[in-house]
Image: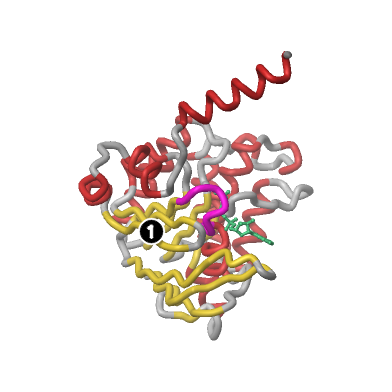
Amino acid sequence: MIDIQHLEKYYDKKHAVKGISLTIQPGEIVGFLGPNGAGKSTTVKILTGLISASEGNAFINGFSIKEHPVEVKKSIGYVPETGALYESLTAWEYLELIADLHYIERPVFEKRAGEFLELFGLSEEKNKRLSGFSKGMRQKVLIAAALLHDPPVLLFDEPLNGVDANTALVFKQLLRRLSQRGKTILFCSHILEVVERLCTRIIIINEGELVTDGTPEQIARDTGHASLESAFNAITGGADADAKAEGFMQALKGLDE
Ligand code: ATP
């Protein structure tokens, strides 16, 4: 379970998160959406303990991010938006390191890491250095690392960045299975089509504030928009895409003259 209470974050004077409160129950797959700069990654990073909150608190599986940061880290699997990997390690060594940090027993590590790499089609590359991995291959290693200790709470920040369509399909199925096993899943993505199909609930934030919270059907009903894409555009005050595109064309025309 994730319980966020009046969370605030300032970066100097920038008020990035403005009093967000929400609860996510085990078994839910929640899509966490918002325009660029809305505060999604900041919120997720606070939940992981990577950065601290300016005000408020959050509880992961009942553990406070302020009072029990180690218990929180044990309880989460996190795929960051831009993940730094130890480039000189091989994929296997990297997973081994993560397993050691979580005190995973050797046979359990070997079985899980072997199966994850196999499922992601990386078995043959497992002894190659991460410095030679493509963006999508790295992303697969990060996803495998997040799942290795079988945590109850999963925080995915743009997890499908760079992965191919086949892997995305496997990942979506995997998330459904994990939610059926009672995992609490928070999923940041800009791919609205995926969110609409996968998530049981959608939370939209804009300029650091929660603006919508509901099932895809509720959001469609409340906004009168059939697709999540047009509902998102209306809720977050997105400009008319056609007018914007025309603006770009006009700017190009100006350059030609
Ligand atoms: P995106 O969809 O583009 O990834 P986001 O919703 O994840 O955006 P955040 O990365 O949380 O947005 O950023 C929220 C706001 O906080 C933005 O205005 C951003 O410029 C600011 N911000 C984020 N990180 C920092 C930082 N380390 N220092 C200063 N400002 C920051």
Please report the bounds of the magenta region as a residue range. 34-40
Q: Is residue 202 magenta?
A: no
Residue at the spot x=53%, y=78% of the render? 65
Q: Is residue 95 left or right of residue 170?
A: right
Q: Please tell me how many numbered marks the rendered image carries.
A: 1
Q: Quadrant of the C terminus?
A: top right
| Above or below, 256 relative to 60 | above
Report the front residue among 36 and 13: 13
Q: Is residue 35 magenta?
A: yes
Helix, strand or loop at label 1? It is: strand
Q: Amino acid at mark 1?
A: Val
Q: Which residue is mark 1?
A: 211
Tell me the residue at 45%/42% (across/down).
Answer: 238
Q: Quadrant of residue 51?
A: bottom right
Q: Is mark 1 within 8 Å of ligand 1?
A: no
Q: Is residue 184 left or right of residue 141?
A: left
What x and y, as percent, mark residue 170? Answer: 41, 38
Please name the colour scheme applied to the rendered image. Answer: secondary structure
Quadrant holding ligand 1? bottom right
Magenta segment, principal secondary structure?
Answer: loop
Q: Where does the image place residue 235, in percent across and percent down from the top left?
A: 37, 49
Q: What residue occupies the far right of the structure in this picture? A: 88
Using the image, determine if residue 133 lies above or below residue 205. above
Residue 53: percent from left, percent from top: 57, 75
Kindly identify the residue that appears in the image at 34 percent across and 53 percent down. Answer: 202
User: What residue do we see at 57% from left, 53% from top?
Assistant: 37
